[in-house]
Amino acid sequence: MSIDTSPGQDGTAQVPGRPLLEVADLVVRYGRGRKAAAAPPAVDGVSFGILPGETVGLVGESGSGKSTIGKAILGLEKCSAGSVRYNGTDITHAGAARRRELGGELRAVFQDPNSSLNPRQSIGASLAEPLRIRGVAAGDARRRAADMLARVGLPREAVDRHPAQFSGGQRQRIAVARALICEPKLVVCDEAVSALDLSTQAQVLNLLADLRDERGLSYLFIAHDISVVRFLAQRVVVLYRGQVMESGPAAAVTESPKHPFTQALVAASPVPRPAEQAARRHQREALGVRTAAAAAAAPAGCPFSNRCPLATDLCRTQRPALRTAGMSDVACHYA
């Protein structure tokens, strides 16, 4: 895949081999003042990078901080510490004007397409809106909207229809079209397929993969199902309570997981074959991992220690650093 070295919005060229996005020691706390200082962080020291044309998957249970990281990258949530760099430029605390400049390069696809589509606007008007904000003439914006609809597998005539006239899967395709119409370099997909049935989910995932390969797009793909992340991502970052448990190539993390939490995630991932599903259920039970409801958060040390069958006093008192185990980086004393 070729790497785009054209100048970005800030006039800097994209350098081959340098991450398009760099997240370093990111911390996000909810609340203000003393309340925020006393609250446990929703994201606690997370670091990763995304290369041009690469898909990185963020996976974890509900409440693990996945969506918060996506919002921090998009400027929808304030960062308490750490940094976010885009194309070599620090955008951690970028103001409104800078964020508007980046609006064409950093886009998002959310779980509910209705949240990004005005039910009173035609599909053509919704797609053309980000182009019109950037000064594109009305006629050209409408033509590009029709072209983008055709690219995501919908009829060009759909520009004159309204969201209520489409199915959930079609509306998600429209949301993808709206995210890509400005030709961004990075798209944050936050649970973009989790609300779809399996057949529609596969269609949207194939569409995202095709568009990535055609346009050299980078994705931050956020999901709770590790098998869905495995399909699209080249690298995977596993989160638990705002901390990175394991990261590495998608095949290594999903086929040979090292961290007990990652092993539990893989074993819990559903499969369509009953015999294999039964084997996974047996494997999950044999791991001895306690359920989230049965274990409170560890006050210190490894956040997973109160659920982990390998945990010792060391795990409960000392937070494990990421270390290399095989092809992955794992935050575990005993992995």
Image (tube, rainbow, N blue to C red):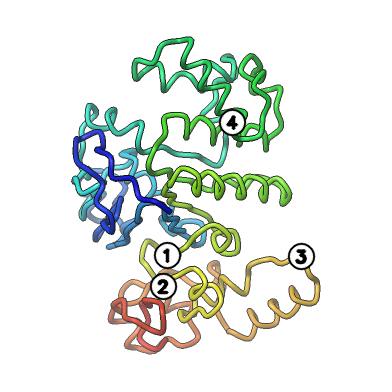
Q: Element under label 4?
A: helix
Q: Element under label 2?
A: strand
Residue 85 point in image, percent of width and height: 23, 49
Q: Name which residue type carries label 1.
A: Val
Q: Measured along the vertical axis of the image, is residue 147 above or below residue 53? A: above
Q: Disc 4 and disc 1: Cα gap in Å?
A: 28 Å
Camera-nearest residue between 32 and 330? 330
- In the image, which disc is placed on residue 186? none
Residues at discs 2 and 1 in contact (Cβ within 8 Å): yes
- Which is more N-terminal, label 4 or label 3? 4
Residues at discs 3 and 1 in contact (Cβ within 8 Å): no
Residue density around tag 2, few if under 14, some if 14–19, many if 20 or more, within 10 Å: many
Q: Disc 3 and disc 1: Cα gap in Å?
A: 25 Å
Q: Name which residue type carries label 4.
A: Ile
- Which is more N-terminal, label 1 or label 4? 4
Residue 98 point in image, percent of width and height: 22, 31
Q: Name which residue type carries label 2.
A: Glu
Q: Disc 3 and disc 2: Cα gap in Å?
A: 26 Å
